[in-house]
Image: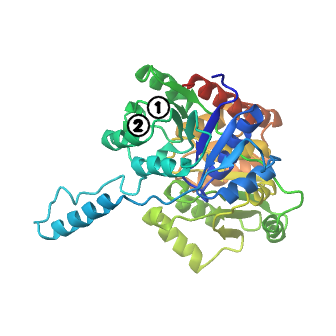
Amino acid sequence: MTARGRTILIYNPLAGHGHLDSWNALVVSFLLERGETVLALTPEPAELLRRLRLLGVATEHSRLSLLPWLNVKPAVWQRIYHRLAGLARFSQAPNPEASKHDPENNYLEPREFAQRLQSALKGVSTRPDFMFNMYMDLYRTDEKRWQAFSQLCGIPWAGLRFIPQSLPLEGYYKTPNLRGMALLDEKLVAAYQEQLPQLAIGYLPDMTDVLIGNHTSHIAQAILTRAQGRKIVFMGGTIGKNKNLACWYALIQQADAGKWFFVQIGEVLTDDLTQEDRDACQAIDLAPPENLYRHIGYLPDERDFNGAIAVADIIYAVYRDFKISSNMLGKAAAFNKPIVVAQEHLMGERVRAYQIGIAIPEDDAFAALEALQTLVERPSNLECFQAYRSDFSTVAFKNSFFQLIDACQP
């Protein structure tokens, strides 16, 4: 079968968090544009349709089918077995080995992945030739669980790793129907390909959704009203320990409130924060600075998020121990906003290479304030933003994505 004209199932295991929803819609739109038939399986199909409409895709498309997302229930024998096993544990002495912390306790089960596919494809006349999982970072990694997955799912497939390990040790790399894997870190592609010569390993540039409304959003207008002409510094996204709230709040406390206005937008994962972050949050909650605007929650409409960036002067992304890419670099380039990042790891490398901002030590609030002042006094060259946009555009992503899935043809 030729590359075009295939039926491809796009599996999105997570919705309503971060920028994965926009990526899901973009990938579906790319495939439809190319002439493929798409079976979309996502927890929030209405959100996918809304985003496709924003992209100008006809949601009544004859080559697009939304599959039912079902919560997987264990079989009767499994429920009985687990209940009996639970009762048996009460009659046994405690097992210290069994009580050890499981670092993957909250990860998704590969078997449920396969069971959900089976349920969704019941009664579907068009069978997928290929499947792509949009977020492989969420799954348990041991080989035994992925063997169970392979016994239930025979579809040739590939997936996307946002945070790939230095070596491909996860159990799914040994499954017989895996055809390839996409990585967001270009430096690891060669090493993975050497370790896994039987698979197609590809690099995908970290694209971003840059749609913005025709009018200034209510959030953007509120920011402008409160800023009153001060320089606006934006920090946003899903906020956990990597966002380094302690340094962010230390910067706000050091900055001249008459010159600087700070914006924080995004869901705060309180359980994931460090104690230092929690202490800083508590101090800010008790005495909120006048020059800080906070929207604590996920913005489902990417246009509102982008609108807030569009009215900002500088983006702040000095993350803690953050080794991978971030789509905030793409947002910075898309809206010609200089960005301050941590000097370590991939983000620092890219900011230095493209000269779209300044990289500083990740826990140095004084250096952050100096960087803000420097970026105001010496703005980045617009050609630098254009170079980044070109290399990390949706077109660049689309071309790389097609190259990967073509190499994965069954």
Q: Residues within 10 Å of mark 1 (few under 14, many from 20)?
A: many
Label 2: which residue?
172
Give 342 or 29, whichever is nearer the viewer. 29
Q: Quadrant of the C terminus?
A: top right
Q: Going from the N terminus, do you reach mark 1 or mark 2 first?
A: 2
Q: Judge from the rendering whether residue 146 lies leftward or rightward of residue 257; answer left or right.
A: left
Q: In the structure shown, which secondary structural element does the residue marked by tag 1 occupy?
A: strand
User: At x 29% / y 59%, what residue is drawn?
Assistant: 77
Q: Are marks 1 and 2 in contact (CB under 8 Å)?
A: yes
Q: Which residue appears at 77% of the width and 37% of the height?
A: 385
Q: For the residue marked with disc 1, what is the amino acid?
A: Leu
Mark 1 to mark 2: distance in Å? Answer: 7 Å
Vertically, is 79 above or below 384? Answer: below
Residue picked out by circle 1: 178
- Occupied quadrant, residue 182: top right
Residue 195 place in picture, x, y as percent:
41, 23
Q: SS of the residue at dot 2? A: helix
Q: Position of residue 121 (x, y in %)?
A: 55, 47
Q: Is residue 393 visible to us here? A: no
